[in-house]
Amino acid sequence: MSGKPRNVAFLIIDPQNDFHEGGSLAVPGADEDAVRIANLINDNRDKIASIYVTMDCHHRMHIAHKGFWTNDQNEMPAEFTMITNADIKSGLWKAAQPENQMHVEWYTKMLEEKNRFKLTIWPEHCLVGTKGNAIVPSINEAIQDWALEYSTVVNYIQKTQHCLTEMYSVFQAEVPLPDVPSTGLNTALLAELGQTYDRVVVCGQASSHCVAFSVRDLVEHWPHYSGDRPISDIILLSDGMSPVATFEKAGEEFVNEMKDKGVTVLKCNQVIL
Protein backbone atom coordinates (compact mmCIF):
# COMPACT_ATOMS: atom_id res chain seq x y z
CA MET A 1 0.00 0.00 0.00
CA SER A 2 1.17 3.56 -0.60
CA GLY A 3 -0.09 7.08 -0.37
CA LYS A 4 -1.18 9.31 2.48
CA PRO A 5 -3.83 7.78 4.77
CA ARG A 6 -7.30 9.27 4.51
CA ASN A 7 -9.18 10.46 7.53
CA VAL A 8 -11.03 7.27 8.50
CA ALA A 9 -11.03 5.69 11.96
CA PHE A 10 -11.82 2.13 12.96
CA LEU A 11 -13.45 1.51 16.33
CA ILE A 12 -13.14 -2.23 17.02
CA ILE A 13 -15.09 -3.28 20.09
CA ASP A 14 -13.65 -6.05 22.31
CA PRO A 15 -12.06 -8.29 19.63
CA GLN A 16 -10.64 -10.56 22.34
CA ASN A 17 -9.98 -14.29 22.51
CA ASP A 18 -12.63 -14.98 25.13
CA PHE A 19 -15.33 -13.80 22.71
CA HIS A 20 -14.06 -16.11 19.95
CA GLU A 21 -14.01 -19.87 19.43
CA GLY A 22 -12.57 -21.63 22.47
CA GLY A 23 -13.11 -18.61 24.70
CA SER A 24 -15.09 -18.61 27.91
CA LEU A 25 -17.84 -16.43 26.40
CA ALA A 26 -17.50 -17.33 22.73
CA VAL A 27 -19.89 -15.51 20.39
CA PRO A 28 -21.15 -17.70 17.51
CA GLY A 29 -19.81 -16.28 14.25
CA ALA A 30 -17.12 -14.12 15.87
CA ASP A 31 -14.22 -15.93 14.19
CA GLU A 32 -15.68 -15.31 10.74
CA ASP A 33 -16.40 -11.69 11.68
CA ALA A 34 -12.77 -11.25 12.72
CA VAL A 35 -11.45 -12.56 9.40
CA ARG A 36 -13.68 -10.14 7.48
CA ILE A 37 -12.58 -7.24 9.69
CA ALA A 38 -8.92 -8.15 9.24
CA ASN A 39 -9.31 -8.40 5.46
CA LEU A 40 -11.01 -5.00 5.32
CA ILE A 41 -8.17 -3.43 7.30
CA ASN A 42 -5.51 -5.13 5.18
CA ASP A 43 -7.18 -3.97 1.97
CA ASN A 44 -7.49 -0.38 3.16
CA ARG A 45 -4.37 0.34 5.20
CA ASP A 46 -3.62 3.44 3.16
CA LYS A 47 -7.05 4.89 3.93
CA ILE A 48 -7.08 4.40 7.71
CA ALA A 49 -5.89 7.25 9.91
CA SER A 50 -6.45 5.66 13.33
CA ILE A 51 -7.52 2.37 14.87
CA TYR A 52 -9.16 2.25 18.28
CA VAL A 53 -9.48 -1.13 19.98
CA THR A 54 -11.56 -1.44 23.13
CA MET A 55 -10.71 -4.20 25.59
CA ASP A 56 -12.84 -5.76 28.29
CA CYS A 57 -10.50 -5.98 31.29
CA HIS A 58 -12.12 -7.79 34.20
CA HIS A 59 -10.98 -8.70 37.66
CA ARG A 60 -12.24 -12.05 38.86
CA MET A 61 -14.20 -10.41 41.67
CA HIS A 62 -16.43 -8.36 39.40
CA ILE A 63 -20.09 -7.60 40.06
CA ALA A 64 -21.09 -9.64 36.99
CA HIS A 65 -19.03 -12.70 37.97
CA LYS A 66 -20.24 -15.49 40.26
CA GLY A 67 -17.51 -15.04 42.89
CA PHE A 68 -18.93 -11.65 43.83
CA TRP A 69 -22.15 -13.27 45.09
CA THR A 70 -23.36 -15.82 47.62
CA ASN A 71 -26.54 -17.04 49.31
CA ASP A 72 -27.48 -18.43 52.72
CA GLN A 73 -26.19 -21.85 51.65
CA ASN A 74 -22.80 -20.34 50.79
CA GLU A 75 -23.41 -21.06 47.09
CA MET A 76 -22.44 -18.93 44.12
CA PRO A 77 -24.99 -18.22 41.37
CA ALA A 78 -24.83 -20.26 38.20
CA GLU A 79 -23.56 -18.61 35.03
CA PHE A 80 -26.22 -16.61 33.17
CA THR A 81 -28.27 -16.13 36.35
CA MET A 82 -30.04 -12.77 36.28
CA ILE A 83 -30.10 -10.99 39.63
CA THR A 84 -32.81 -8.41 40.27
CA ASN A 85 -33.25 -5.82 42.97
CA ALA A 86 -36.10 -7.95 44.34
CA ASP A 87 -33.75 -10.96 44.56
CA ILE A 88 -31.38 -8.95 46.73
CA LYS A 89 -34.08 -7.48 48.95
CA SER A 90 -35.55 -10.95 49.51
CA GLY A 91 -32.16 -12.36 50.46
CA LEU A 92 -32.02 -14.77 47.52
CA TRP A 93 -28.60 -13.36 46.61
CA LYS A 94 -26.23 -11.11 48.51
CA ALA A 95 -22.76 -9.68 48.06
CA ALA A 96 -20.05 -12.08 49.24
CA GLN A 97 -18.37 -9.13 50.95
CA PRO A 98 -20.87 -7.54 53.38
CA GLU A 99 -19.47 -4.06 52.78
CA ASN A 100 -20.79 -4.28 49.19
CA GLN A 101 -24.38 -5.11 50.17
CA MET A 102 -25.72 -1.55 50.18
CA HIS A 103 -24.03 -0.95 46.85
CA VAL A 104 -25.63 -3.94 45.10
CA GLU A 105 -29.07 -2.91 46.36
CA TRP A 106 -28.54 0.58 44.94
CA TYR A 107 -26.89 -0.72 41.76
CA THR A 108 -29.65 -3.13 40.75
CA LYS A 109 -32.25 -0.48 41.53
CA MET A 110 -30.46 1.96 39.20
CA LEU A 111 -30.24 -0.65 36.42
CA GLU A 112 -33.97 -1.18 36.57
CA GLU A 113 -34.81 2.53 36.75
CA LYS A 114 -32.62 3.17 33.68
CA ASN A 115 -34.22 0.20 31.84
CA ARG A 116 -30.84 -1.44 31.26
CA PHE A 117 -30.11 -5.15 30.95
CA LYS A 118 -30.70 -7.02 34.19
CA LEU A 119 -27.51 -7.83 36.07
CA THR A 120 -26.31 -11.05 34.41
CA ILE A 121 -23.73 -13.41 35.86
CA TRP A 122 -21.40 -14.02 32.94
CA PRO A 123 -18.74 -16.72 32.66
CA GLU A 124 -15.49 -15.24 33.88
CA HIS A 125 -14.00 -13.63 30.79
CA CYS A 126 -11.25 -11.31 29.63
CA LEU A 127 -9.52 -11.51 33.01
CA VAL A 128 -6.50 -9.23 33.19
CA GLY A 129 -3.31 -11.16 32.47
CA THR A 130 -4.98 -14.14 30.79
CA LYS A 131 -4.90 -15.38 27.21
CA GLY A 132 -8.61 -14.65 26.96
CA ASN A 133 -7.91 -10.96 27.41
CA ALA A 134 -5.63 -10.78 24.36
CA ILE A 135 -6.73 -9.63 20.91
CA VAL A 136 -7.80 -12.45 18.57
CA PRO A 137 -4.82 -13.24 16.26
CA SER A 138 -6.48 -12.46 12.91
CA ILE A 139 -7.35 -8.91 13.92
CA ASN A 140 -4.18 -8.40 15.94
CA GLU A 141 -1.99 -9.24 12.97
CA ALA A 142 -3.90 -6.84 10.73
CA ILE A 143 -3.74 -3.89 13.11
CA GLN A 144 -0.06 -4.49 13.93
CA ASP A 145 0.84 -4.62 10.24
CA TRP A 146 -1.04 -1.34 9.72
CA ALA A 147 0.76 0.26 12.66
CA LEU A 148 4.17 -0.87 11.41
CA GLU A 149 3.57 0.34 7.86
CA TYR A 150 2.61 3.83 9.03
CA SER A 151 4.96 4.05 12.04
CA THR A 152 2.05 4.69 14.36
CA VAL A 153 0.28 3.06 17.30
CA VAL A 154 -3.05 1.38 17.90
CA ASN A 155 -5.20 3.21 20.45
CA TYR A 156 -6.14 0.63 23.10
CA ILE A 157 -8.99 1.56 25.43
CA GLN A 158 -9.47 -0.58 28.51
CA LYS A 159 -12.91 -0.81 30.06
CA THR A 160 -14.78 -2.67 32.81
CA GLN A 161 -11.85 -2.38 35.20
CA HIS A 162 -13.96 -1.15 38.10
CA CYS A 163 -15.46 -4.12 39.91
CA LEU A 164 -18.65 -2.43 41.14
CA THR A 165 -20.27 -1.60 37.80
CA GLU A 166 -20.69 -3.10 34.34
CA MET A 167 -19.42 -1.32 31.24
CA TYR A 168 -20.83 -2.67 27.99
CA SER A 169 -20.31 0.70 26.29
CA VAL A 170 -16.80 2.03 25.87
CA PHE A 171 -18.17 5.51 26.54
CA GLN A 172 -19.73 5.02 29.97
CA ALA A 173 -20.65 2.42 32.58
CA GLU A 174 -24.13 0.95 32.86
CA VAL A 175 -24.40 2.78 36.16
CA PRO A 176 -21.72 5.49 36.47
CA LEU A 177 -20.28 5.66 39.98
CA PRO A 178 -20.40 9.22 41.36
CA ASP A 179 -16.93 9.01 42.92
CA VAL A 180 -15.24 7.27 39.96
CA PRO A 181 -14.86 9.68 37.01
CA SER A 182 -13.64 6.93 34.65
CA THR A 183 -17.11 5.32 34.78
CA GLY A 184 -18.82 8.51 33.60
CA LEU A 185 -19.35 9.68 30.03
CA ASN A 186 -16.05 9.78 28.11
CA THR A 187 -16.57 13.13 26.42
CA ALA A 188 -12.95 13.30 25.29
CA LEU A 189 -13.29 10.12 23.22
CA LEU A 190 -16.64 11.23 21.82
CA ALA A 191 -15.13 14.54 20.75
CA GLU A 192 -12.05 12.89 19.26
CA LEU A 193 -14.12 10.52 17.14
CA GLY A 194 -16.67 13.14 16.17
CA GLN A 195 -14.31 15.98 15.28
CA THR A 196 -11.12 14.34 13.99
CA TYR A 197 -12.21 11.88 11.31
CA ASP A 198 -14.31 11.95 8.17
CA ARG A 199 -15.88 8.60 9.00
CA VAL A 200 -15.85 6.11 11.86
CA VAL A 201 -16.14 2.39 11.07
CA VAL A 202 -17.46 0.30 13.97
CA CYS A 203 -17.30 -3.48 14.41
CA GLY A 204 -16.42 -6.13 16.99
CA GLN A 205 -18.26 -8.12 19.63
CA ALA A 206 -20.98 -8.44 20.46
CA SER A 207 -23.82 -6.85 18.49
CA SER A 208 -26.24 -7.60 21.33
CA HIS A 209 -24.16 -6.00 24.05
CA CYS A 210 -20.89 -4.05 23.86
CA VAL A 211 -21.13 -2.97 20.22
CA ALA A 212 -24.78 -2.07 20.68
CA PHE A 213 -24.32 0.03 23.77
CA SER A 214 -21.18 1.71 22.43
CA VAL A 215 -22.79 2.70 19.14
CA ARG A 216 -25.97 3.88 20.85
CA ASP A 217 -23.88 6.22 22.99
CA LEU A 218 -21.88 7.39 19.98
CA VAL A 219 -25.05 8.10 17.99
CA GLU A 220 -26.80 9.83 20.89
CA HIS A 221 -23.93 12.26 21.41
CA TRP A 222 -22.76 12.55 17.79
CA PRO A 223 -24.63 15.79 16.96
CA HIS A 224 -23.08 17.61 19.92
CA TYR A 225 -19.52 16.35 19.52
CA SER A 226 -19.30 16.25 15.71
CA GLY A 227 -20.61 19.71 14.90
CA ASP A 228 -23.90 18.32 13.58
CA ARG A 229 -22.26 16.14 10.94
CA PRO A 230 -24.58 13.47 9.52
CA ILE A 231 -25.05 10.25 11.46
CA SER A 232 -24.30 8.46 8.18
CA ASP A 233 -20.60 9.21 8.77
CA ILE A 234 -20.77 6.33 11.26
CA ILE A 235 -20.40 3.02 9.38
CA LEU A 236 -21.54 -0.14 11.17
CA LEU A 237 -20.31 -3.45 9.75
CA SER A 238 -23.25 -5.85 9.82
CA ASP A 239 -21.04 -8.89 9.18
CA GLY A 240 -18.25 -7.62 11.43
CA MET A 241 -20.20 -8.41 14.60
CA SER A 242 -22.50 -11.11 15.99
CA PRO A 243 -24.85 -11.45 18.98
CA VAL A 244 -24.25 -13.44 22.14
CA ALA A 245 -26.11 -16.78 21.96
CA THR A 246 -29.79 -16.42 23.00
CA PHE A 247 -29.55 -12.63 22.54
CA GLU A 248 -30.10 -12.72 18.78
CA LYS A 249 -33.25 -10.59 19.04
CA ALA A 250 -31.35 -7.86 20.87
CA GLY A 251 -28.75 -7.85 18.11
CA GLU A 252 -31.38 -7.56 15.38
CA GLU A 253 -33.20 -4.78 17.21
CA PHE A 254 -29.95 -2.85 17.57
CA VAL A 255 -29.15 -3.02 13.85
CA ASN A 256 -32.67 -1.96 12.87
CA GLU A 257 -32.58 0.88 15.38
CA MET A 258 -29.30 2.18 13.96
CA LYS A 259 -30.64 2.03 10.40
CA ASP A 260 -33.65 4.07 11.51
CA LYS A 261 -31.35 6.66 13.09
CA GLY A 262 -29.35 7.09 9.89
CA VAL A 263 -26.22 5.06 10.63
CA THR A 264 -24.68 3.56 7.48
CA VAL A 265 -24.97 -0.22 7.84
CA LEU A 266 -22.88 -2.22 5.37
CA LYS A 267 -21.28 -5.60 4.91
CA CYS A 268 -17.51 -5.58 4.86
CA ASN A 269 -17.36 -6.20 1.10
CA GLN A 270 -19.64 -3.20 0.49
CA VAL A 271 -17.39 -0.69 2.23
CA ILE A 272 -15.56 1.80 0.03
CA LEU A 273 -13.19 4.02 2.00
Image: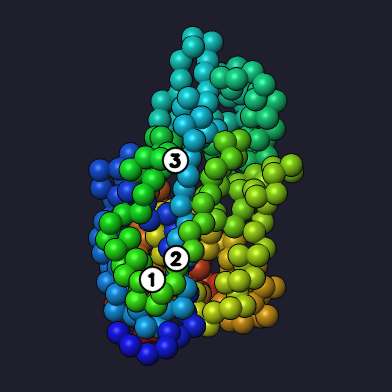
Q: In this view, which residue lies farthest toward the bottom?
A: 3
Q: State which tag comes first along the sequence, 3 or 1.
A: 3
Q: In which quarter of the image is residue 227?
A: bottom right
Residue drawn at x 59%, y 40% is 162
Q: In which quarter of the image is the C terminus?
A: bottom left
Helix, strand or loop status at disc 3: loop
Q: What residue type is labelled 3?
A: Val
Q: Distance between the residues labelled 2 and 1?
A: 7 Å
- Percent across and percent down for residue 139 are 32, 62
Q: What residue type is labelled 2?
A: Val
**Residue 202 visible in the shown view:** no
Q: State which tag comes first along the sequence, 2 or 3.
A: 3
- Percent across and percent down for residue 56 are 46, 48
Helix, strand or loop status at disc 1: helix
Question: Are the two marked residues, 2 and 3, in contact with CB atoms closer than 8 angstroms?
Answer: no
207 vs 72, left or right, is left
Q: What mark, if any, has residue 147 been given in the picture?
A: 1
- Percent across and percent down for residue 154 are 44, 65
Q: What mark, if any, has residue 154 been given in the picture?
A: 2
- Above-or-below relation of 23 to 52: above
